[in-house]
Image (tube, rainbow, N blue to C red):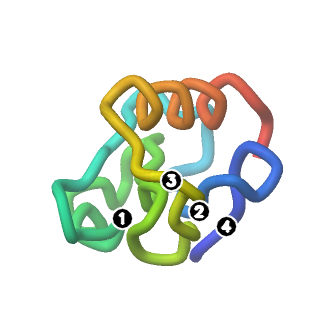
Amino acid sequence: MLQAFAGGRLFGEQFGTGSPWAVALHGWGRTHTDFAAVLRGLDAVAFDLPGFGATPPPAIAWGSPDYAEAVAAAISAPA
């Protein structure tokens, strides 16, 4: 089920019932749904990176450090 992370800055899906121990990040032009079959039954999370799937695009073009900061914020903050 789609849910918000990091205060609504990222969207994705949490799998399992415990704290996630794995994070799945999709490739360019893809979404969190790519991982549904693989993560089913695991304690994991798959995000829609900014500009993909349900997560809105950033106001300006991002580089790798910007995406890394967004994911770091999402995994360190409660859903």
State the residue position of label 3: 60
The numbered mark at residue 3 is 4
CA–CA distance in space, label 2 to label 1: 9 Å
CA–CA distance in space, label 4 to label 1: 11 Å
At numbered mark 3, what does the secondary structure look like: helix, strand or loop? loop
Q: Earlier in the sequence, mark 2 or mark 3?
A: 2
Amino acid type of the residue that numbered disc 3 sits on in the rendered structure: Ile
CA–CA distance in space, label 2 to label 4: 6 Å
47 relative to 18, above or below: below
State the residue position of label 2: 11
CA–CA distance in space, label 2 to label 3: 19 Å
**Disc 2 to disc 4: CB gap under 8 Å:** yes
Q: Earlier in the sequence, mark 2 or mark 4?
A: 4
Residue at x 51%, y 53% (from the top left corner): 60
Amino acid type of the residue that numbered disc 2 sits on in the rendered structure: Phe
Q: Earlier in the sequence, mark 3 or mark 4?
A: 4
CA–CA distance in space, label 1 to label 3: 22 Å
**Disc 3 to disc 4: CB gap under 8 Å:** no
